[in-house]
Amino acid sequence: MKHIFQKENHYISYVILGKSIYEAVEKFFDKKNTIIVINHPALFHNAVKSLKLHKPLCIGHLGAALERKNSHAFFKLAKLLEPEVRSGLLEFKIIGKCSPDFDEDDCGLISYSRESLSEEDFQVAVKNIDFTVQLTTDSICRAIASGTFIDSLIYEKPVVGLHSSYLDCYLSDSCAGAFICRNTEELAECIKTKLLMMSESDYEKALSDLDFVKEKFSIDYNAKLFKQQGEI
């Protein structure tokens, strides 16, 4: 598509869903083309915050286990935390289909299904986890808005994961609703020393911080961004 983007066209305006995505693809566009940069709009229904942590603490991988989501790292993470899983302190779940491609990584520490989940089953499963995991890094993908990150916000679940330009664009170091690390080993240590030690009040603070992040994806916020960048 880059050959199309590079042509000047006064009849088309491009809408890009994220500042970090725009920075990744800006070079492909003719400078005279109109580009509108907003965040991925999301509808936030009145989800009820689950202020009570589950026992064992549950970390969920939303959606199918895929190479482009760096799902191999989820199995590695579980292996690094095997003592905590075996002792009943921690649980890992893939809320979606896990393909046989990951059979070699399977260490019996992660719950998953070989079949796709219905929307109803997906919603029930997400409600029963405490954190979602985000493992896609810039080395894998830089130009796609993260649907699993937005689902985390919709379902009121704090985030643990690895640094990427997309996540870093929305999450500050002071955000209690996110624990973002440089690598899988650091993430495992974070889960062991912070998440497993978290109190109910700490978790409530994490959920409250997510409200500020959600605002950036709201319809009203994005409508203002759209309007600021000119009429179509």
Image (spheres, rainbow, N blue to C red):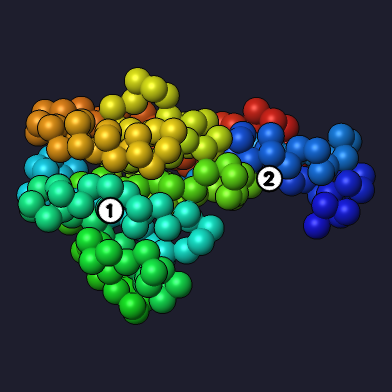
Left or right placement of residue 118 versus residue 149 in this view: left
Residue 209 % position (x, y): 29, 28
Residue plotted at (73% across, 42% down): 25
SS for tag 1? helix
Q: Is residue 123 visible?
A: no
Image quadrant where residue 185 sits: top left
How many residues crowd around disc 2 within 10 Å: few (fewer than 14), some, or many (20 or more)?
some
SS for tag 2? strand
Q: Residue furthest right?
A: 8
| Quadrant of the snapshot with the N terminus | bottom right
Q: Residue furthest bottom?
A: 115
Residue 58 % position (x, y): 19, 51
Q: Earlier in the sequence, mark 1 or mark 2?
A: 2
Residue plotted at (86% across, 54% down): 4
Question: What residue is disc 2 on?
Answer: 15
Q: CA distance from mark 1 to mark 2?
A: 41 Å
| Quadrant of the snapshot with the C terminus | top right
Left or right placement of residue 80 versus residue 218 in this view: left
Q: Would you place residue 170 above or below residue 10 in this image?
A: above
Q: Residue furthest top?
A: 174
Which is nearer the eye, 35 or 126?
126
Left or right placement of residue 169 versus residue 90 in this view: right
Residue 78 % position (x, y): 27, 53
Residue plotted at (49% across, 31% down): 168
Q: Would you place residue 1 above or below residue 43 in this image?
A: below
Q: Would you place residue 15 above or below residue 113 in this image?
A: above
Q: Residue 79 shows which numbered tag?
A: 1
Q: Is residue 21 visible?
A: yes
